[in-house]
Amino acid sequence: MSHSIDTAMLRSDAHSPSWAALNRMAQGGSGEVYSRVEPLERLDFCIPCNPYFPTPEMFEQLRGSLEGILKYYPSDADTITAELCALVGLNPQTVTMGNGSTELITWIDRLLVHESLAVPIPTFGRWTDQPLETGKRVDMYQLREDQDFALDPQAYVRFIRRRGSKVAVVCNPNNPDGGYLQRQKVLWLLDELSDLDLVVVDESFIDFVDEEPVTSVADQAAIRPNVIVLKSLGKNFGLHGIRFGYMVANPALAGTVRRALPKWNLNSFAETVVFMLKEYAAQYRQSLTLLARDRANMSLALTGLPGLTVFLSQGNFILVKLPDGADGVRLRDYLLAEHGVFVRECGNKLGSSSQFMRLVVRPYGDVERLLTGLQYYFYGAPAPSPYQPVGAYPPQQAAPQAAGWI
């Protein structure tokens, strides 16, 4: 049975459609093209989830708790925050939890951004869209392709001084390219910008970094007067649907945002998962090791496609530039319709174009279908590849040490 896919829906917003919307579209849309793949067989290379976490055992435990989760009120946010802080080693007075990191970005903008905000682009769209929606001036610092979209801290500071920006944002690793700024360079940036109203370091994907053993600057945010570090639990744990994240700042800043939020802004799913994390800490650390292995394998496999430029990433996604003349919109629609592969075309990201595509890291068995689709689209047929993934070991085997936060 084939399912129609109305690809016009993919171009209707600055954000990709939800997985639920995509399945509804497959089941009942009139469609410009037609998928040959059943909805449950579709592979998601668009939404940056952790493919190894939660574990099947954790999902089974959640299923067993479903009636209570749905039927009863959750605890208040302070109770859930206290449990999270016990896990991550932070003072609850320095942490504010939100119904997703986007809720926290909204309130940071409304409460703490008064005039202007500087942000490197391309990056996560809410850091440009949210302040623009509330009438702020957004000073966009263009990251350069010929520098692999790497952020030059000194050049960024010069840009901020030249523009007179009052607030600065850094996403580390950055989305969509996965570029990572080492901790020492971030600390230098915080020192240089200590006179600004606010500096936000968005660390939504930092758990996936394996470049150095200590990555986060959350410990510094807790004691500095103008720094906020943002974390996204949904992205780390592969649970986007729960909508939970947190920010770390000194008690005054954290309290300002906390007082603006409803007392019960977190749902029962979020509470249940937070209270389960201690039990599954080892599995979470292992998931990060497995994902780092898959990222290296996937990068190498993509590099073998002629004409495709692959950018180094420390996130759970990889940015690629398509061959000259290739249209990312047409490729995205083709991959979804003909191969059941859902990808993120970056034409609606400020500072990017439709020649760029962000591909979520997945296990190599899934990557093979992506590679087949790309080869058919670019070259007419898949070519045999001598490449074989390396570093594989059974998921139940103890993994090497991973740079997790638990």
Image (spheres, helix red, strand yellow):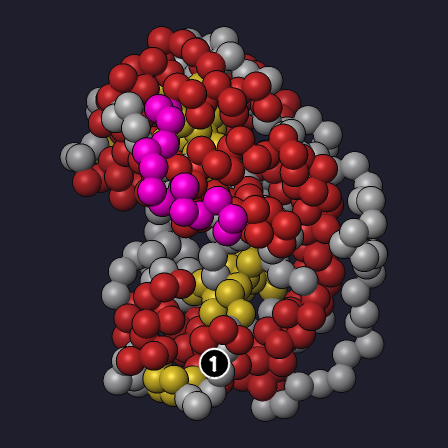
Magenta segment, which residues? 63-77
Q: Could you tell me which residue is drawn at 48 percent across and 44 percent down? A: 65
In this rendering, the count of numbered labels is 1
Tell me the quarter of the image containing the C terminus. Answer: top right
Task: Tell which residue pokes out farthest to the left in this image.
Answer: 135
64 is within the stretch colored magenta = yes
Q: Quadrant of residue 158?
A: top left
Q: Residue at x 45, y 75 (%)?
A: 39
- Say what amino acid the circle numbered 1 marks: Glu
Answer whether residue 98 is visible to the viewer in this image: yes
- Residue 307 in the image: x percent, y percent? 61, 73
Q: Is residue 334 visible?
A: no
Quarter containing the N terminus: bottom left
Q: Classify residue 27 as left or right of residue 357.
A: left
Q: What x and y, as percent, mark residue 351?
A: 39, 51
Secondary element at tag 1: loop
Depth order, front residue of 145/50 = 50
Which secondary structure type mostly characterizes the magenta part of the structure?
helix
Q: Which residue is mark 1?
A: 38
Q: Is residue 374 above or below residue 232?
A: below
Q: Is residue 210 above or below residue 341?
A: above
Q: Nearer the viewer, residue 10 or 39?
A: 39
Q: Position of residue 14 (x, y in %)?
A: 30, 57
Does the magenta portion include 215? no
Residue at 25% across / 26% down in the picture?
262
Q: Position of residue 385 (x, y in %)?
A: 77, 79
Q: What crowding class fits label 1: few (fewer than 14 Cα within 10 Å), some (14-19), or many (20 or more)?
A: some
